[in-house]
Amino acid sequence: AQTVTQSQPEMSVQEAETVTLSCTYDTSESDYYLFWYKQPPSRQMILVIRQEAYKQQNATENRFSVNFQKAAKSFSLKISDSQLGDAAMYFCAYRIDFGGSQGNLIFGKGTKLSVKP
Amino acid sequence: KAGVTQTPRYLIKTRGQQVTLSCSPISGHRSVSWYQQTPGQGLQFLFEYFSETQRNKGNFPGRFSGRQFSNSRSEMNVSTLELGDSALYLCASSLGLRNRETQYFGPGTRLLVL
């Protein structure tokens, strides 16, 4: 069974500093997608960044970037120049193609990120 | 373009009752997925619909069911509610079935079962 593990239940970062959230996953598939979603308190989940497993280049979206290590099955999220608005639960998620279905997202338990002013 | 909308946003029910939750996807999106979020189990996949057909189903009892209408709106139903069904129910939509497409989430329906 596919699993996603986020080993850091909580993390804290100083405003303007950089923080890295860890994620590992377990799969026997070779073609899949990885995502980081952000869920602010009492607000809806939004996509932060996504990575296709077949792409070697790490994805970046403004201050957010990933370190994708396919052999190690690791997918960490780096947030640069942290802002107060980055405070949220961050979920790492994985998805394969079941054929005839988009495939469901498999989520980690989440990492609660606090940003200190 | 309007995002995914879910109604109602909050619900309080008692054990044994049934409940229906509604999800309207982003305009043009034809795939709708449902997830249950609880503090203990985290986010778990319930089911996925495309073109009014259930394409994928998670490991939930038969009390949980869903459907999709021709306009892509989806409903999920939980019968004979149990205390453990208290959760945030999230709906996500995407354009279609191609797995490179991103799922966009709604704000969720928070269900409390007393």
Image (cartoon, coloured by chain):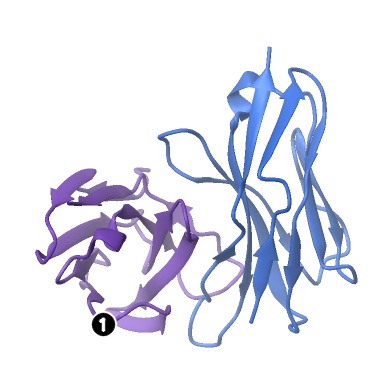
Chain colours: A blue, B purple
Report the front residue among B53 and A69: A69
Residue A29 percent coordinates (x, y): 73, 83
- Circle 1 SS class: loop
Decide if residue B61 is in sight here.
yes
Up the image or down, B83 lies above or below A29; here it is above
| Quadrant placement of the N terminus of chain A | bottom right
Residue B68 percent coordinates (x, y): 24, 73
Report the front residue among A101 and B83: B83
Q: Which residue is mark 1?
A: B62
Q: Residue at x 65, y 34 (%)?
A: A113
**In the rendered picture of this protein, how many numbered marks are placed on residues?**
1
Decide if residue B95 is in sight here.
no
Report the front residue among A74 and B54: A74
Q: Is residue A105 left or right of residue A84?
A: left
Residue B75 percent coordinates (x, y): 22, 65
Quadrant assignment, res A19: top right
Q: Is residue A9 left or right of residue B31?
A: right
Q: Residue at x 38, y 43 (%)?
A: B1
Pointer 1: residues within 10 angstroms few (<14), some, or many (20+)? few
Q: Residue at x 46, y 51 (%)?
A: B39
Marked residue chain, label 1: B
Going by the picture, which residue comes out furthest to the bottom? Answer: A99
Q: Is residue A105 left or right of residue B25?
A: right
Report the front residue among B17 and A60: B17
Residue B77 percent coordinates (x, y): 19, 69
Q: Residue at x 60, y 29 (%)?
A: A87
| Quadrant placement of the C terminus of chain A | top right
* Residue type beneath disc 1: Gly
